[in-house]
Amino acid sequence: MTNIKKTTMRDIAKRVNVSINTVSLALQNSELVHPETKARVLEAVQELGYAPNVMAQNLRRGVVHAIGVMIPDTNNFHFWDIVEGVQDEAYKNGYGVVLTNTRLNRERELETLRGLLENRYSGVVLATTYSEQFPAEMDNLLRLGGAVVTLGRTWKGADRISYFREDAAEMLLEHLYALGHRHIGFVLGVAKEGLAHERLVAYQNFIAERNLVPLLEKCGPTIPDSITATKRLLSNHPRPTAIMAVNDYLALGVYRAIGEHGLKIPDDISVAGFDNTMIAENLYPSLTSVDVGGWQIGSMAARLLFERIADPKRPQQIVEMPARLFARESTAPPNIKTTQSAD
């Protein structure tokens, strides 16, 4: 693999034939540098594609800006997409990111919230699972004046990114219904009751409004859980001709169970998920999935933090992220023979 050398201030200094200190002062628009020298430095910066490392500059000045990010599950690529969005926006603003993973564990989430309080970060982005059980910690985060952005879940006074509303699930269900599916299963794998509530409500309403047979299997948040839940669905009569997983990660378990059952996707059963992570486009067949923009969520969360840091007294901000459906190879009209066997 070819190593691409990053341009440094030393390279700029060598090109212009000045000291590194002169380059540094020129980039700070210091009056100590002659205008003609400044112009030559900026010209070299453009020619060599130099990008100043804001974090390194802050460290040299003795200023450390950091935001804390709490996610519930590092196994789920959706949260990595969010983290990347936060990091990219934070880097542009000269901030570092400290990441914590609660592993969907109640006690670990509580300790993480307390740790965020003790470290007094400039702001925090929270993807919580049990936050309603820790009102004191959440209230203290806000009371201390720090910038707080919650993802998906509401907390009074905290800015929030809203996504995965009922219309996101309705979009996917309409897609399956338009293909001709009338036996639609749902693998709802969550760490605790109440999570993914909007997807559950959308499914229940959709099934009831069209007088379809509900084929719902609740389970835990791991792939083995979704394998077991899918196997239960496949033993139903009628058997589903399409299965919707609560996220792309658990769709992996759906794929596995269908294969072990001797069935093919989408010939025998269509499969779809949520998040549109890298899993979706790299599975075979590629997975139909609903995208709410993981990277965009993270980037917007960071922007809300910086705006809150700049203006602590502004009203609570709630940003709603739009959903998009990416239809891929895993969904197709139901096979006539499969439909008959399901009935």
Image (cartoon, rainbow, N blue to C red):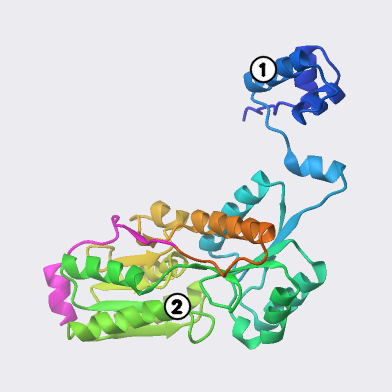
Magenta-colored stretch includes residue 322 = yes
Q: Tag 1, which secondary structure?
A: helix
The residue positioned 41% from the left and 73% from the top of the image is 246
Whether residue 299 is visible to the viewer of this picture, yes or no, is: yes
Span shown in magenta: 321-343
Quick check: can you spot residue 334?
A: no
The quadrant in which the N terminus is found is top right
Label 1 sits on residue: 43
- The reply, left or right, for residue 57 in relation to residue 281 is right
> What residue type is disc 2 on?
Ala
Judging depth in this view, the residue of 204 and 223 nearest the camera is: 204
**Type of amino acid under label 1:** Glu
Q: Secondary structure at mark 2?
A: loop
Q: Position of residue 110 (x, y in %)?
A: 71, 80
Contact between marks 2 and 1 (CB within 8 A): the answer is no
Is 32 placed left or right of 311 in the picture?
A: right
Q: Nearer the viewer, mark 2 or mark 1?
A: 1
Q: Considering depth in this image, is 220 or 239 the residue closer to the camera?
A: 220
Eyeballing the image, is 199 above or below 249? Answer: below
Residue at which label 2 appears: 196
Task: Pick the residue in front: 20 or 179.
Answer: 20
Q: Is residue 240 left or right of residue 44?
A: left
